[in-house]
Amino acid sequence: MIRLAVTGALGRMGRTVLTLADKSEEFQIVGAVEKKGHPALGRTLKDLSVADKEIRLVDDLKEVIEECDVVIDFTEPASALNHFFIARDWKKAIVIGTTGFTKDQMDLMVLEKRVRAVISPNMSMGVNLLFSILRVISKILSKDYDIEIVEMHHKMKRDAPSGTALKLKEIIIEENPSLNWQPVYGRYGITGERKKEEIGILSLRGGDTIGEHTVIFFGEGERLEITHRITSRENFARGALLAAKWILKKEEGIYSMEDVIGLKEAFEKFFS
């Protein structure tokens, strides 16, 4: 069985990951970590009705890192970065679904070669398929169509735009690097005519919306919209657990969920 430690254990995603892992015959939960000062520290997952395990909640990944094979992290950027380097130092694999990283924080991880890690702003198979589809569409339409991204999430989400929306923006730019792209995060007042180089990114927050992303290509006389909606956090959790199994078989390096699912190879073969 794969020995699993989960950070952010009592957050929305941490709870979901632990619940699914507890039901799986492939995983053994050996560690659950929460931030310092959390009122549930010292209590067990069973006592907290998260999983049927007498695993005590601790506030430092180092307390359980030796016992695990892989860490799954859904916390916040500073904590996730710390957990990333703990995993590196103990030669453990890590799956990071945390979003909101700065460019400098992301560069620190991406440039690290001595760790096995899957880092993705979205663990959903459908969203990662959207990433691959967008690469193809962007190559064809970006020069002649205006592109806007709309994302919506629950009112408790702290970062905006979402990590997924930023990834969508990055894909569009990567596929057409010669254009002088100008991201616009919302509009207000007399903004003048829309510039061709703009990528509009609008963030909506409210209620219990788990996640929705739409990329819109505006042409002359037509409009193409691609939308992905999440209706259950279990999609993210299942993706994270899939990534946890996958990364244990890989060499050291930084991987994405597109790598886990094999979408890059599939699309390259399809369009070759």
Image (tube, helix red, strand yellow):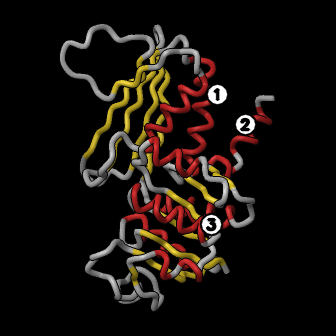
Which of the numbered marks, if any, corresponds to residue 93?
3
Q: Position of residue 94 (x, y in %)?
A: 58, 64
Q: CA distance from mark 1 to mark 2?
A: 9 Å
Q: Quadrant of residue 244?
A: bottom right
CA separation in Å, label 3 and label 1 = 31 Å
Q: Quadrant of residue 68?
A: bottom right
The quarter holding residue 218 reads top left
Numbered mark located on residue 184 in the image: none
- Amino acid under disc 1: Val
Q: Secondary structure at mark 2?
A: helix
Residue bearing mark 1: 136
Q: Amino acid at mark 3?
A: Ala
Residue 264, relative to residue 92: is it above or below? above
Looking at the image, do the residues carrying marks 1 and 2 touch, with CB atoms under 8 Å apart?
yes
Identify which residue, 40 or 144, lies in the foreground: 40
* Residue shown at 75% from the left, 59% from the top: 251
Q: Residue 254, percent across and down?
A: 64, 52
Badge 1 crowding class, 10 Å Cα cut-off, few under 14, some 14 to 19, many 20 or more, is some
Q: Amino acid at mark 2?
A: Phe
Residue 178's x, y, as percent? Answer: 58, 15
